[in-house]
């Protein structure tokens, strides 16, 4: 299932909808385990478009790529019971799984990882909409709002 979450961005000149190109994560650091690297489908993946858009947004927000990163999570609520959370954080928390995708760090807390493992984060930019797209094999259904799901 796929759900759309939007972070404010400015449109680029390229408005084509190309196929997602996955970027290989580098070895996770700090609190992460080797299984979090994503090589066996247990970690996360970011497409090249998502990485580029995160870099642009981090620069705009003044988040240091060396210390900060993108925090992905899951919270209770929403139309289907769970909602995706996406924001920037200035540093990882003690028990976070930390991924490094070509210089973009992604932080995931242990509870959220249960719902996000195997997920791919893409960025879609079409004439109809633009935003981050969670492609999550753990989602059994989602609703029309695009940011709520159940597993």
Image (tube, rainbow, N blue to C red):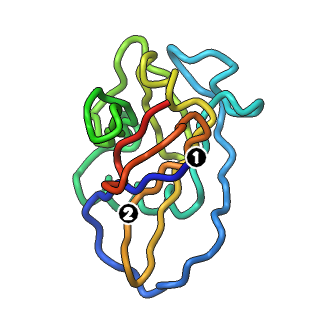
- Does 132 appear above or below 98? below
Q: Which residue is drawn at 36% across and 74% down?
A: 129
Q: Residue at x 48, y 49 (%)?
A: 134
Say whether disc 2 or disc 1 marks the residue closer to the N-terminus. 1
SS at circle 1: strand
SS at circle 2: strand
CB under 8 Å between callouts 2 and 1? no
Indicate the quadrant where residue 119 lies: top right
Give percent across and percent down for residue 132. 42, 57
Give percent across and percent down for residue 39. 75, 33
- Does 108 appear above or below 57? above
As rendered, which of 37 and 68 lies closer to the eye? 37
Indicate the quadrant where residue 55 lies: bottom left
At label 1, counting other C-alpha atoms closer than 10 Å, the crowd grade (few under 14, some 14-19, many 20 or more) is: many
As rendered, which of 106 and 148 lies closer to the eye? 148
- Does 151 appear above or below 58? above
Which residue in the rendered view is the most extreme toward the right? 40
Estimate the spatial distance between the alpha carbons at disc 2 and disc 1, rounded to whole Å. Answer: 14 Å
Residue that badge 1 annotates = 120
Count the labels in the image: 2
Horizontal side of 122 relative to 33 (left or right) equals left
- Name the disc covering residue 108, or none: none
Q: Which residue is drawn at 41% across and 55% down?
A: 54
Give percent across and percent down for residue 31. 51, 14
- Does 100 appear above or below 60? above
Q: Residue at x 38, y 50 (%)?
A: 143
At label 2, counting other C-alpha atoms closer than 10 Å, the crowd grade (few under 14, some 14-19, many 20 or more) is: some
Residue that badge 2 annotates = 131
């Amino acid at each position: 299932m796929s759900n759309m979450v939007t972070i404010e961005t400015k449109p680029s000149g390229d408005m084509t909808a190309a196929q997602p190109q996955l970027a290989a994560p580098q070895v996770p650091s700090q609190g992460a385990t080797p299984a979090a690297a994503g090589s066996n489908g247990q970690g996360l993946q970011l497409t090249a478009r998502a990485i580029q858009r995160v870099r642009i947004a981090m620069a705009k927000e003044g988040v240091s790529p060396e210390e900060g990163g993108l925090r992905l999570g899951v919270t209770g609520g929403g139309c289907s019971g769970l909602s995706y959370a996406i924001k920037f954080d200035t540093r990882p928390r003690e028990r976070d799984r930390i991924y490094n995708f070509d210089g973009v760090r992604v932080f995931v807390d242990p509870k959220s990882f249960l719902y996000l493992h195997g997920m791919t984060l893409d960025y879609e930019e079409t004439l109809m909409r633009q935003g981050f797209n969670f492609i999550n094999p753990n989602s059994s259904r989602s609703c029309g709002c695009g940011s709520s799901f159940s597993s």
